Image: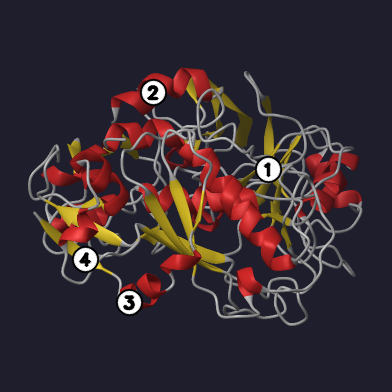
Amino acid sequence: MMPAWRSGVAQLLVAAALLAVGLPAGAAATFQIINIDDPGVGFNDPTPAAPVGGNTGTTRGAQRLNVFMAAASTWGATLTSPVTIYIAASFAPLTCTPTSAVLGAAGAYGIWTDFPGAAHANTLYPQALANKLAGQDLSLLDPAGPYPDIIAFFNGNLGQAGCLTGLFFYLGLDNNHGANIDLYTVLLHEFGHGLGFQTFTDESTGAYFADLPSIWDYFIYDDTQAKSWVAMTQSERMISAINVRKVVWSGANVTSAVPTVLALGTPRLHVDSGPVPSATGDYPVGPVSFGAMLASPGVSGQLMPVIAQPGGTGPGCDPYNAVNALAVNGNIALVDRGVCPFAVKAKNAQNAGARGVVFANNVPGSPPPGASGTDPTVVIPAVVISLADANLLKAALVYRSRKTSGVVANLGVNAGQFAGADTLGRMLLFTPNPVQPGSSVSHWDQIATPNQLMEPAINADLQHTVTVPRDMTFQLLKDIGW
Protein backbone atom coordinates (compact mmCIF):
# COMPACT_ATOMS: atom_id res chain seq x y z
CA MET A 1 0.00 0.00 0.00
CA MET A 2 1.45 3.36 -1.01
CA PRO A 3 0.57 6.93 -1.90
CA ALA A 4 1.55 7.36 -5.54
CA TRP A 5 1.27 11.14 -5.46
CA ARG A 6 0.17 14.08 -3.36
CA SER A 7 0.16 17.83 -3.85
CA GLY A 8 2.78 20.08 -2.37
CA VAL A 9 0.30 22.23 -0.40
CA ALA A 10 -0.58 19.63 2.22
CA GLN A 11 0.78 21.58 5.19
CA LEU A 12 -1.23 24.68 4.29
CA LEU A 13 -4.40 22.61 4.12
CA VAL A 14 -3.78 20.86 7.42
CA ALA A 15 -3.23 24.22 9.07
CA ALA A 16 -6.58 25.39 7.72
CA ALA A 17 -8.52 22.29 8.74
CA LEU A 18 -10.32 23.98 11.65
CA LEU A 19 -12.17 26.12 9.09
CA ALA A 20 -13.85 23.06 7.59
CA VAL A 21 -17.63 23.19 7.18
CA GLY A 22 -19.41 19.84 7.28
CA LEU A 23 -22.61 18.78 5.56
CA PRO A 24 -25.67 17.78 7.57
CA ALA A 25 -25.65 14.32 9.11
CA GLY A 26 -27.49 11.58 7.25
CA ALA A 27 -25.85 11.98 3.85
CA ALA A 28 -24.80 8.73 2.18
CA ALA A 29 -21.30 10.19 2.06
CA THR A 30 -20.11 13.05 4.26
CA PHE A 31 -18.22 15.94 2.66
CA GLN A 32 -16.34 18.75 4.34
CA ILE A 33 -15.26 21.96 2.64
CA ILE A 34 -11.92 23.28 3.94
CA ASN A 35 -11.63 27.04 3.44
CA ILE A 36 -8.01 27.89 2.56
CA ASP A 37 -8.63 31.49 1.48
CA ASP A 38 -6.83 34.39 3.10
CA PRO A 39 -8.80 36.82 5.28
CA GLY A 40 -10.98 39.21 3.31
CA VAL A 41 -10.94 37.33 -0.01
CA GLY A 42 -12.72 34.38 -1.60
CA PHE A 43 -14.93 32.63 0.92
CA ASN A 44 -13.96 35.32 3.43
CA ASP A 45 -15.03 38.24 1.21
CA PRO A 46 -17.21 40.47 3.43
CA THR A 47 -18.81 42.39 0.54
CA PRO A 48 -22.57 42.60 1.26
CA ALA A 49 -24.76 40.57 -1.12
CA ALA A 50 -28.52 40.25 -1.43
CA PRO A 51 -29.90 36.68 -1.20
CA VAL A 52 -30.36 35.17 -4.66
CA GLY A 53 -32.00 32.04 -6.04
CA GLY A 54 -32.42 30.30 -2.68
CA ASN A 55 -28.95 31.26 -1.47
CA THR A 56 -29.54 33.07 1.82
CA GLY A 57 -25.96 34.23 2.38
CA THR A 58 -25.62 37.96 3.03
CA THR A 59 -21.99 38.38 1.96
CA ARG A 60 -20.29 37.40 -1.26
CA GLY A 61 -18.03 34.99 0.59
CA ALA A 62 -20.89 33.30 2.44
CA GLN A 63 -22.83 32.84 -0.79
CA ARG A 64 -19.84 31.21 -2.47
CA LEU A 65 -19.47 28.80 0.42
CA ASN A 66 -23.18 28.01 0.33
CA VAL A 67 -22.93 26.99 -3.34
CA PHE A 68 -19.94 24.78 -2.55
CA MET A 69 -21.95 23.19 0.25
CA ALA A 70 -24.95 22.60 -2.03
CA ALA A 71 -22.87 20.96 -4.77
CA ALA A 72 -21.07 18.78 -2.23
CA SER A 73 -24.46 17.88 -0.72
CA THR A 74 -25.67 16.65 -4.12
CA TRP A 75 -22.66 14.37 -4.37
CA GLY A 76 -23.00 13.36 -0.71
CA ALA A 77 -26.57 12.21 -1.27
CA THR A 78 -25.46 10.18 -4.29
CA LEU A 79 -22.29 8.42 -3.13
CA THR A 80 -21.68 5.99 -0.29
CA SER A 81 -18.48 6.01 1.74
CA PRO A 82 -17.63 5.34 5.40
CA VAL A 83 -14.83 7.91 5.17
CA THR A 84 -15.37 11.68 5.17
CA ILE A 85 -14.43 13.31 1.85
CA TYR A 86 -12.47 16.52 2.30
CA ILE A 87 -12.40 19.24 -0.36
CA ALA A 88 -9.77 21.95 0.11
CA ALA A 89 -11.19 24.97 -1.65
CA SER A 90 -10.14 28.46 -2.60
CA PHE A 91 -11.98 31.30 -4.32
CA ALA A 92 -8.94 33.52 -4.90
CA PRO A 93 -8.06 35.60 -8.00
CA LEU A 94 -6.82 33.55 -10.96
CA THR A 95 -5.43 34.40 -14.39
CA CYS A 96 -7.78 36.39 -16.61
CA THR A 97 -8.11 39.09 -19.28
CA PRO A 98 -11.10 41.23 -20.32
CA THR A 99 -12.18 38.52 -22.79
CA SER A 100 -10.97 35.26 -21.23
CA ALA A 101 -10.45 33.76 -17.80
CA VAL A 102 -9.49 30.64 -15.92
CA LEU A 103 -12.79 29.75 -14.22
CA GLY A 104 -11.24 27.21 -11.91
CA ALA A 105 -10.10 23.64 -11.62
CA ALA A 106 -10.37 20.67 -9.31
CA GLY A 107 -8.96 17.20 -9.15
CA ALA A 108 -7.82 14.36 -6.94
CA TYR A 109 -5.30 15.57 -4.37
CA GLY A 110 -3.83 12.16 -3.61
CA ILE A 111 -3.45 9.00 -5.72
CA TRP A 112 -3.09 5.56 -4.12
CA THR A 113 -2.23 2.05 -5.22
CA ASP A 114 -2.16 -1.45 -3.65
CA PHE A 115 -4.43 -0.73 -0.69
CA PRO A 116 -6.90 -3.15 0.91
CA GLY A 117 -10.02 -3.39 -1.24
CA ALA A 118 -8.40 -2.36 -4.54
CA ALA A 119 -9.89 -4.31 -7.46
CA HIS A 120 -6.61 -4.18 -9.38
CA ALA A 121 -3.03 -4.34 -8.11
CA ASN A 122 -0.44 -1.83 -9.33
CA THR A 123 -3.23 0.54 -10.35
CA LEU A 124 -3.76 4.22 -9.50
CA TYR A 125 -6.94 5.26 -7.67
CA PRO A 126 -8.02 8.77 -6.64
CA GLN A 127 -7.81 9.14 -2.87
CA ALA A 128 -11.54 9.56 -2.14
CA LEU A 129 -12.31 6.29 -3.95
CA ALA A 130 -9.31 4.53 -2.41
CA ASN A 131 -10.51 5.57 1.04
CA LYS A 132 -14.00 4.21 0.36
CA LEU A 133 -12.66 0.86 -0.84
CA ALA A 134 -10.15 0.58 2.00
CA GLY A 135 -12.67 1.69 4.61
CA GLN A 136 -10.22 4.15 6.16
CA ASP A 137 -8.56 7.51 5.55
CA LEU A 138 -5.35 6.38 3.88
CA SER A 139 -3.76 9.81 4.22
CA LEU A 140 -3.49 9.20 7.97
CA LEU A 141 -1.02 6.40 7.19
CA ASP A 142 1.35 8.77 5.37
CA PRO A 143 3.89 10.54 7.64
CA ALA A 144 3.18 13.71 5.65
CA GLY A 145 -0.58 13.42 6.15
CA PRO A 146 -3.35 13.93 6.74
CA TYR A 147 -4.34 15.74 3.57
CA PRO A 148 -7.58 16.31 1.67
CA ASP A 149 -9.08 14.19 -1.09
CA ILE A 150 -9.89 16.92 -3.60
CA ILE A 151 -8.27 20.29 -4.29
CA ALA A 152 -10.39 23.03 -5.91
CA PHE A 153 -9.49 26.55 -7.05
CA PHE A 154 -11.97 29.03 -8.53
CA ASN A 155 -11.63 32.57 -9.82
CA GLY A 156 -12.78 35.16 -7.30
CA ASN A 157 -12.33 38.04 -9.76
CA LEU A 158 -14.61 36.70 -12.48
CA GLY A 159 -16.82 39.40 -13.99
CA GLN A 160 -14.90 42.34 -12.60
CA ALA A 161 -13.31 44.87 -14.93
CA GLY A 162 -10.41 43.21 -16.72
CA CYS A 163 -11.48 39.64 -15.87
CA LEU A 164 -14.00 38.34 -18.42
CA THR A 165 -15.67 41.65 -17.79
CA GLY A 166 -19.39 41.49 -17.07
CA LEU A 167 -19.75 37.68 -16.97
CA PHE A 168 -20.19 36.45 -13.40
CA PHE A 169 -20.58 33.22 -11.50
CA TYR A 170 -24.28 32.90 -10.67
CA LEU A 171 -24.49 32.15 -6.94
CA GLY A 172 -28.14 31.12 -6.77
CA LEU A 173 -29.12 27.51 -6.13
CA ASP A 174 -32.07 27.41 -8.55
CA ASN A 175 -30.18 27.12 -11.90
CA ASN A 176 -31.74 30.41 -13.02
CA HIS A 177 -28.37 31.67 -14.25
CA GLY A 178 -29.43 33.40 -17.46
CA ALA A 179 -26.35 34.43 -19.46
CA ASN A 180 -24.03 34.03 -16.49
CA ILE A 181 -22.07 30.92 -15.43
CA ASP A 182 -23.87 28.65 -12.99
CA LEU A 183 -21.33 27.98 -10.22
CA TYR A 184 -23.38 25.05 -8.85
CA THR A 185 -23.08 23.20 -12.19
CA VAL A 186 -19.39 24.01 -12.54
CA LEU A 187 -18.74 22.61 -9.07
CA LEU A 188 -20.66 19.40 -9.73
CA HIS A 189 -18.45 18.93 -12.81
CA GLU A 190 -15.16 19.67 -11.08
CA PHE A 191 -15.95 17.61 -7.99
CA GLY A 192 -16.74 14.76 -10.40
CA HIS A 193 -13.16 14.94 -11.66
CA GLY A 194 -11.84 14.90 -8.11
CA LEU A 195 -13.91 11.83 -7.28
CA GLY A 196 -12.40 9.89 -10.17
CA PHE A 197 -13.77 11.08 -13.50
CA GLN A 198 -10.26 11.33 -14.95
CA THR A 199 -7.26 9.33 -16.03
CA PHE A 200 -3.81 10.03 -14.61
CA THR A 201 -2.21 8.77 -17.84
CA ASP A 202 -0.69 11.49 -20.03
CA GLU A 203 -3.08 11.96 -22.93
CA SER A 204 -0.39 13.67 -25.04
CA THR A 205 2.27 10.97 -24.78
CA GLY A 206 0.33 7.91 -23.65
CA ALA A 207 2.73 7.51 -20.72
CA TYR A 208 1.44 6.11 -17.44
CA PHE A 209 1.88 8.25 -14.33
CA ALA A 210 4.45 6.57 -12.06
CA ASP A 211 4.58 3.76 -14.66
CA LEU A 212 1.16 2.51 -13.50
CA PRO A 213 -2.25 2.56 -15.18
CA SER A 214 -5.21 4.43 -13.71
CA ILE A 215 -8.35 2.52 -12.77
CA TRP A 216 -9.95 4.66 -15.51
CA ASP A 217 -7.68 3.06 -18.16
CA TYR A 218 -9.30 -0.38 -17.72
CA PHE A 219 -12.50 1.03 -19.24
CA ILE A 220 -11.11 3.13 -22.12
CA TYR A 221 -11.67 1.06 -25.27
CA ASP A 222 -10.54 1.95 -28.79
CA ASP A 223 -12.93 0.67 -31.46
CA THR A 224 -10.22 0.88 -34.13
CA GLN A 225 -7.50 -0.96 -32.24
CA ALA A 226 -10.01 -3.25 -30.46
CA LYS A 227 -8.07 -2.84 -27.21
CA SER A 228 -8.44 -1.20 -23.83
CA TRP A 229 -5.78 1.27 -22.73
CA VAL A 230 -4.31 -1.19 -20.25
CA ALA A 231 -3.66 -3.60 -23.14
CA MET A 232 -1.94 -0.97 -25.30
CA THR A 233 1.62 0.20 -25.62
CA GLN A 234 2.41 3.81 -24.81
CA SER A 235 2.50 4.74 -28.50
CA GLU A 236 -0.85 3.02 -29.08
CA ARG A 237 -2.42 5.06 -26.26
CA MET A 238 -1.00 8.24 -27.77
CA ILE A 239 -2.66 7.40 -31.09
CA SER A 240 -5.91 6.41 -29.38
CA ALA A 241 -6.16 9.75 -27.55
CA ILE A 242 -6.71 11.50 -30.91
CA ASN A 243 -8.87 8.81 -32.54
CA VAL A 244 -11.88 11.06 -33.04
CA ARG A 245 -15.19 9.49 -32.00
CA LYS A 246 -13.72 5.99 -32.03
CA VAL A 247 -12.90 5.66 -28.30
CA VAL A 248 -15.56 4.57 -25.82
CA TRP A 249 -16.19 3.77 -22.17
CA SER A 250 -16.69 0.02 -21.79
CA GLY A 251 -18.03 -0.08 -18.21
CA ALA A 252 -21.23 -2.08 -17.72
CA ASN A 253 -23.07 0.54 -15.63
CA VAL A 254 -22.65 3.26 -18.25
CA THR A 255 -23.43 0.99 -21.19
CA SER A 256 -26.63 -0.32 -19.60
CA ALA A 257 -27.80 3.25 -18.95
CA VAL A 258 -27.17 4.58 -22.47
CA PRO A 259 -30.70 3.76 -23.76
CA THR A 260 -32.21 5.45 -20.70
CA VAL A 261 -30.18 8.66 -20.90
CA LEU A 262 -29.20 9.32 -24.51
CA ALA A 263 -31.53 10.17 -27.37
CA LEU A 264 -31.69 7.95 -30.42
CA GLY A 265 -30.26 9.56 -33.53
CA THR A 266 -26.58 10.42 -33.93
CA PRO A 267 -26.19 13.69 -35.87
CA ARG A 268 -24.34 13.34 -39.14
CA LEU A 269 -23.65 14.96 -42.47
CA HIS A 270 -23.92 12.33 -45.19
CA VAL A 271 -22.46 13.20 -48.56
CA ASP A 272 -22.95 11.49 -51.91
CA SER A 273 -20.37 12.90 -54.29
CA GLY A 274 -20.73 11.34 -57.73
CA PRO A 275 -17.84 13.19 -59.43
CA VAL A 276 -15.43 12.53 -56.53
CA PRO A 277 -16.32 9.19 -54.92
CA SER A 278 -13.57 9.57 -52.29
CA ALA A 279 -15.60 12.39 -50.72
CA THR A 280 -18.67 10.19 -50.26
CA GLY A 281 -19.54 9.14 -46.73
CA ASP A 282 -20.50 10.35 -43.24
CA TYR A 283 -18.77 13.36 -41.69
CA PRO A 284 -18.58 14.14 -37.96
CA VAL A 285 -20.50 17.26 -37.03
CA GLY A 286 -20.62 19.72 -34.17
CA PRO A 287 -24.05 20.41 -32.63
CA VAL A 288 -25.80 23.76 -32.99
CA SER A 289 -27.85 25.39 -30.23
CA PHE A 290 -30.53 26.87 -32.52
CA GLY A 291 -32.65 25.86 -35.50
CA ALA A 292 -34.49 22.64 -36.23
CA MET A 293 -33.45 19.43 -34.55
CA LEU A 294 -31.79 16.95 -36.87
CA ALA A 295 -34.06 14.03 -37.66
CA SER A 296 -34.47 11.02 -39.91
CA PRO A 297 -34.56 11.01 -42.92
CA GLY A 298 -33.33 14.59 -42.61
CA VAL A 299 -33.11 17.21 -45.33
CA SER A 300 -31.18 16.82 -48.58
CA GLY A 301 -29.94 19.06 -51.34
CA GLN A 302 -26.95 20.06 -53.39
CA LEU A 303 -24.16 21.36 -51.14
CA MET A 304 -23.66 24.93 -52.39
CA PRO A 305 -20.89 27.23 -51.07
CA VAL A 306 -21.76 30.80 -50.20
CA ILE A 307 -19.25 33.00 -52.00
CA ALA A 308 -17.96 36.43 -50.97
CA GLN A 309 -20.34 39.25 -51.81
CA PRO A 310 -19.03 42.62 -53.04
CA GLY A 311 -19.18 45.05 -50.12
CA GLY A 312 -20.19 42.27 -47.72
CA THR A 313 -19.15 42.28 -44.05
CA GLY A 314 -18.23 38.60 -43.88
CA PRO A 315 -19.10 35.13 -45.20
CA GLY A 316 -22.86 34.74 -44.99
CA CYS A 317 -23.22 37.77 -42.72
CA ASP A 318 -25.39 39.85 -45.07
CA PRO A 319 -28.66 39.26 -46.94
CA TYR A 320 -27.74 37.12 -49.95
CA ASN A 321 -27.25 38.71 -53.34
CA ALA A 322 -28.86 37.14 -56.41
CA VAL A 323 -25.94 34.78 -57.08
CA ASN A 324 -25.86 33.26 -53.59
CA ALA A 325 -29.64 33.19 -53.31
CA LEU A 326 -29.94 31.25 -56.57
CA ALA A 327 -27.32 28.77 -55.37
CA VAL A 328 -28.76 27.94 -51.96
CA ASN A 329 -32.49 28.13 -52.70
CA GLY A 330 -33.78 24.59 -52.16
CA ASN A 331 -30.27 23.38 -51.34
CA ILE A 332 -27.88 23.21 -48.38
CA ALA A 333 -25.63 26.22 -47.83
CA LEU A 334 -21.93 25.71 -47.06
CA VAL A 335 -20.88 28.82 -45.12
CA ASP A 336 -17.44 29.64 -43.73
CA ARG A 337 -17.29 30.47 -40.04
CA GLY A 338 -16.18 33.93 -38.91
CA VAL A 339 -16.95 37.65 -38.47
CA CYS A 340 -20.61 37.40 -37.38
CA PRO A 341 -22.65 35.03 -35.16
CA PHE A 342 -23.67 31.59 -36.38
CA ALA A 343 -27.36 32.39 -35.91
CA VAL A 344 -27.07 35.43 -38.21
CA LYS A 345 -25.51 33.29 -40.93
CA ALA A 346 -28.25 30.66 -40.54
CA LYS A 347 -31.03 33.25 -40.73
CA ASN A 348 -29.58 34.79 -43.90
CA ALA A 349 -29.34 31.37 -45.52
CA GLN A 350 -32.89 30.55 -44.47
CA ASN A 351 -34.18 33.83 -45.88
CA ALA A 352 -32.55 32.91 -49.20
CA GLY A 353 -34.42 29.59 -49.29
CA ALA A 354 -31.76 27.20 -47.98
CA ARG A 355 -33.02 23.91 -46.56
CA GLY A 356 -30.11 23.66 -44.16
CA VAL A 357 -26.69 25.09 -43.32
CA VAL A 358 -23.25 23.53 -42.95
CA PHE A 359 -20.77 25.79 -41.16
CA ALA A 360 -17.13 25.25 -42.17
CA ASN A 361 -14.81 25.70 -39.20
CA ASN A 362 -11.97 28.15 -39.79
CA VAL A 363 -9.31 26.56 -37.57
CA PRO A 364 -7.83 23.05 -37.71
CA GLY A 365 -9.07 20.32 -35.41
CA SER A 366 -11.58 17.50 -35.14
CA PRO A 367 -14.25 16.80 -34.05
CA PRO A 368 -15.72 20.14 -35.04
CA PRO A 369 -16.90 22.34 -32.18
CA GLY A 370 -20.50 23.15 -31.50
CA ALA A 371 -22.09 26.44 -32.53
CA SER A 372 -23.74 28.65 -29.94
CA GLY A 373 -26.35 31.33 -30.39
CA THR A 374 -30.07 31.95 -30.10
CA ASP A 375 -32.68 32.85 -32.71
CA PRO A 376 -36.10 31.22 -32.39
CA THR A 377 -36.95 32.31 -35.95
CA VAL A 378 -34.32 29.98 -37.42
CA VAL A 379 -36.25 26.83 -38.33
CA ILE A 380 -33.80 25.01 -40.61
CA PRO A 381 -31.17 22.53 -39.34
CA ALA A 382 -27.49 23.42 -39.13
CA VAL A 383 -24.22 21.70 -38.20
CA VAL A 384 -20.50 22.50 -38.01
CA ILE A 385 -17.84 20.50 -39.86
CA SER A 386 -14.06 20.59 -39.47
CA LEU A 387 -11.80 22.76 -41.61
CA ALA A 388 -10.19 19.66 -43.14
CA ASP A 389 -13.56 18.14 -44.08
CA ALA A 390 -14.77 21.46 -45.46
CA ASN A 391 -11.69 21.74 -47.67
CA LEU A 392 -12.21 18.16 -48.88
CA LEU A 393 -15.83 18.87 -49.78
CA LYS A 394 -15.04 22.16 -51.47
CA ALA A 395 -12.48 20.37 -53.64
CA ALA A 396 -15.15 17.83 -54.60
CA LEU A 397 -17.62 20.43 -55.87
CA VAL A 398 -18.09 20.19 -59.65
CA TYR A 399 -20.38 22.95 -60.88
CA ARG A 400 -22.85 22.17 -63.57
CA SER A 401 -24.62 25.46 -62.85
CA ARG A 402 -25.07 27.78 -59.91
CA LYS A 403 -27.84 25.41 -58.79
CA THR A 404 -25.91 22.14 -58.77
CA SER A 405 -22.48 21.17 -57.49
CA GLY A 406 -22.48 17.42 -58.00
CA VAL A 407 -22.30 16.92 -54.23
CA VAL A 408 -25.57 15.91 -52.57
CA ALA A 409 -25.67 16.33 -48.82
CA ASN A 410 -28.08 15.10 -46.17
CA LEU A 411 -28.39 16.71 -42.75
CA GLY A 412 -29.96 14.17 -40.46
CA VAL A 413 -29.31 11.43 -37.95
CA ASN A 414 -28.46 7.77 -37.89
CA ALA A 415 -31.76 6.75 -36.33
CA GLY A 416 -30.38 3.48 -35.00
CA GLN A 417 -27.47 4.99 -33.07
CA PHE A 418 -27.66 6.83 -29.76
CA ALA A 419 -26.36 10.41 -29.84
CA GLY A 420 -23.08 10.20 -27.94
CA ALA A 421 -22.50 6.45 -28.32
CA ASP A 422 -20.84 4.17 -30.88
CA THR A 423 -22.81 1.74 -33.04
CA LEU A 424 -22.68 -0.85 -30.23
CA GLY A 425 -24.22 1.55 -27.71
CA ARG A 426 -21.04 2.38 -25.77
CA MET A 427 -20.57 5.97 -24.60
CA LEU A 428 -18.06 8.04 -26.60
CA LEU A 429 -15.15 9.72 -24.84
CA PHE A 430 -13.74 13.08 -25.92
CA THR A 431 -10.72 12.37 -28.14
CA PRO A 432 -10.10 15.45 -30.28
CA ASN A 433 -7.27 15.84 -32.76
CA PRO A 434 -5.06 17.59 -31.80
CA VAL A 435 -5.06 16.49 -28.20
CA GLN A 436 -6.39 18.94 -25.59
CA PRO A 437 -4.36 18.40 -22.39
CA GLY A 438 -6.62 18.32 -19.36
CA SER A 439 -9.73 17.70 -21.49
CA SER A 440 -8.96 14.79 -23.82
CA VAL A 441 -10.15 11.35 -22.71
CA SER A 442 -11.33 12.54 -19.27
CA HIS A 443 -14.68 13.85 -20.61
CA TRP A 444 -17.61 12.63 -22.66
CA ASP A 445 -17.74 13.60 -26.32
CA GLN A 446 -19.68 16.82 -26.83
CA ILE A 447 -22.10 15.19 -29.28
CA ALA A 448 -23.98 13.52 -26.40
CA THR A 449 -27.70 14.37 -26.40
CA PRO A 450 -28.96 15.52 -23.98
CA ASN A 451 -25.85 17.39 -22.92
CA GLN A 452 -23.98 15.65 -20.12
CA LEU A 453 -22.39 17.22 -17.05
CA MET A 454 -18.95 15.78 -17.83
CA GLU A 455 -18.60 17.09 -21.38
CA PRO A 456 -15.57 19.35 -21.92
CA ALA A 457 -17.73 22.49 -21.80
CA ILE A 458 -20.48 23.52 -19.38
CA ASN A 459 -23.71 23.81 -21.35
CA ALA A 460 -26.52 26.15 -20.35
CA ASP A 461 -29.19 23.43 -20.32
CA LEU A 462 -27.55 21.23 -17.67
CA GLN A 463 -29.50 20.35 -14.55
CA HIS A 464 -28.25 19.99 -10.97
CA THR A 465 -28.06 16.22 -11.18
CA VAL A 466 -25.39 13.54 -11.65
CA THR A 467 -27.68 10.52 -12.00
CA VAL A 468 -29.92 8.77 -14.50
CA PRO A 469 -32.23 9.34 -16.25
CA ARG A 470 -30.67 12.73 -17.04
CA ASP A 471 -26.95 12.26 -16.46
CA MET A 472 -24.34 9.51 -16.73
CA THR A 473 -21.67 10.75 -14.28
CA PHE A 474 -22.55 8.53 -11.34
CA GLN A 475 -22.84 5.51 -13.63
CA LEU A 476 -19.20 5.93 -14.62
CA LEU A 477 -18.09 6.37 -11.02
CA LYS A 478 -19.89 3.13 -10.17
CA ASP A 479 -17.92 1.40 -12.91
CA ILE A 480 -14.62 2.37 -11.28
CA GLY A 481 -15.74 1.29 -7.81
CA TRP A 482 -18.03 3.86 -6.20
Mark closer to the observer (1, 3)? 3
Mark closer to the observer (4, 2)? 4
13 relative to 242, above or below: below
**Three-letter amino acid code at the position of disc 3:** Gln
Q: For the residue carrying disc 1, how many other residues have a C-alpha within 10 Å: few (<14), some (14-19), or many (20+)? A: many
Q: Quadrant of the C terminus?
A: top left
Task: Tell me, yes or no, whether the two marked residues, 4 and 3, touch with CB atoms within 8 Å.
Answer: no
Q: Quadrant of residue 99?
A: bottom right
Residue at x 68%, y 35% (from the top left corner): 302
* Residue 200 drawn at (x, y percent): 27, 57
Residue 288 marker: 1
Between disc 4 and disc 1, whose residue precedes? 4
Which residue in the protein does label 2 denote?
425
Residue 5 marker: 4
* Residue 93 drawn at (x, y percent): 60, 78
Q: For the residue carrying disc 2, how many other residues have a C-alpha within 10 Å: few (<14), some (14-19), or many (20+)? A: many
Cα separation, mark 4 vs mark 2, equals: 35 Å
Q: Quadrant of residue 288?
A: top right
Between disc 1 and disc 3, whose residue precedes? 3
Which residue in the protein does label 3 denote?
11
Task: Tell me, yes or no, whether the two marked residues, 2 and 1, touch with CB atoms within 8 Å.
Answer: no
Q: Quadrant of the N terminus?
A: bottom left
Cα separation, mark 1 vs mark 3, equals: 47 Å
* Residue 50 drawn at (x, y percent): 85, 59
Residue at x 72%, y 64% (from the top left corner): 338
Mark closer to the observer (4, 1)? 4
* Residue 205 drawn at (x, y percent): 23, 64
Cα separation, mark 4 vs mark 1, equals: 41 Å
94 relative to 1, above or below: below
Mark closer to the observer (4, 3)? 3
